[in-house]
Every structure is written in structure tokens, then in C-alpha cells.
Image (cartoon, rainbow, N blue to C red):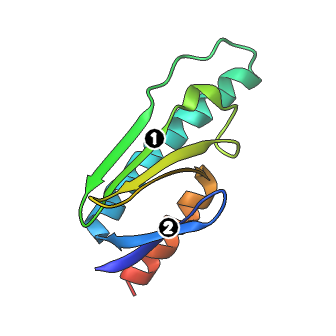
Amino acid sequence: MNQFTINLTQGSVSFTFSENAAQKLKQEISILMQSLKEIALNAKAGGKPNRQQAMEYQHTGDVFLEVFCNPNIYPGPFAAKVLITVRDDRLRLTSEAELTRLVEDLEQYLATVNS
């Protein structure tokens, strides 16, 4: 398995991550992006935004990874941040990351795995 590196607001974290888990995370982020775009379009049109469901991705492998984002508190995808939690039996790290940066990190990881 390859190392997946997530660039956080300050610093980064790397851990082993499967391609299958990365694809599932990509799907969850895609749904989140749609929610964020809908919120932005409603705001632009002057309408009241419909409440969107929060993204709560969880994966258990060598470490436990959780990615959480409430799209209702951001005006659009470029302003959104995600809460990242990485933990195992000895360590727990919780930090924020920009959603756009997480997307870039994920795309870079998948490109590396598929090459």
C-alpha cells in the first residue's frame, strides 16, 4: 500500500491508504462538492439555501481516518474546510484542511497509485 499525505492547515500527515479507500473518499467528496455548489447557486439567486447533509467519511485500515465537513456553514466549495482525524492505538491527530487542498492531495495519490 502507498503512503497518502494530507496537507493540513499547518503541517501534514502521511499514512498507508488503499486505492479502494481513496476512491470511496473521492466519491464522498464529489457528493460534498455538489452540495456546496447548490448552496452557492441558491445564495447567488437570492433564495434560501436548502440544508445539506454533512459529509462524514470514515475508514479503518492501519489507522482510523475520519473526514468531516458541514457544507451549510460555507458559501461555496473554495471556502470549505474539512476536519481530519487520524488515529491509532497510540496517536490521535485532529486538524483542519482546506477542501480544495484535500482534493489535490487525493488526486495526486490516485495518480501515483495508478502509474
Please state if 95 lies on the left or on the right of 29 as rendered: right
Q: Quadrant of residue 101?
A: bottom right
Is 105 rendered above or below residue 71? below
Dot label at residue 68: 1
Is disc 1 surrounded by few (<14), some (14 to 19) or many (20+) residues within 10 Å? Answer: some
- Count of labels in the image: 2
Query: Which residue is more in the foreground, 79 or 40?
Result: 79
Above or below, comparing residue 86 to residue 108 in the picture = above
Look at label 1 and name its amino acid: Phe
Residue 65, by quadrant, is bottom left
Q: Which mark is residue 92?
A: none
Residue shown at the point (26%, 65%) measured from the top left: 20
Left or right of 37: which side holds 57?
Answer: left
- Residue situated in front as seen by the camera: 14 or 113: 14
Residue 18, by quadrant, is bottom left
Instruction: Estimate the x, y position of residue 43 in percent, counting from the top left.
Output: 72, 22
* In the image, farthest residue toward the top: 48
Q: Quadrant of the C terminus?
A: bottom left
Q: Which residue is mark 2?
A: 13
Give the farthest residue toward the front: 90
With respect to residue 57, does 10 lie above or below?
Answer: below
- Give percent across and percent down for residue 86: 40, 56
Q: Residues within 10 Å of mark 2 (few under 14, many from 20)?
A: some
Residue 77 image offset from top left, x and y in percent: 64, 42
Residue at figure coordinates x 51%, y 74% from the top left: 108
Left or right position of 24 against 110: left
Q: Secondary structure at mark 1?
A: strand
In the rendered view, tell whether residue 43 sits above or below residue 6: above
x and y percentages locating residue 66 in the rendered image? 38, 48
User: The N terminus is located in which quarter?
Assistant: bottom left
Which residue is drawn at the image coordinates 70% and 31% (left, top)?
Answer: 75
Kind of residue at badge 2? Val
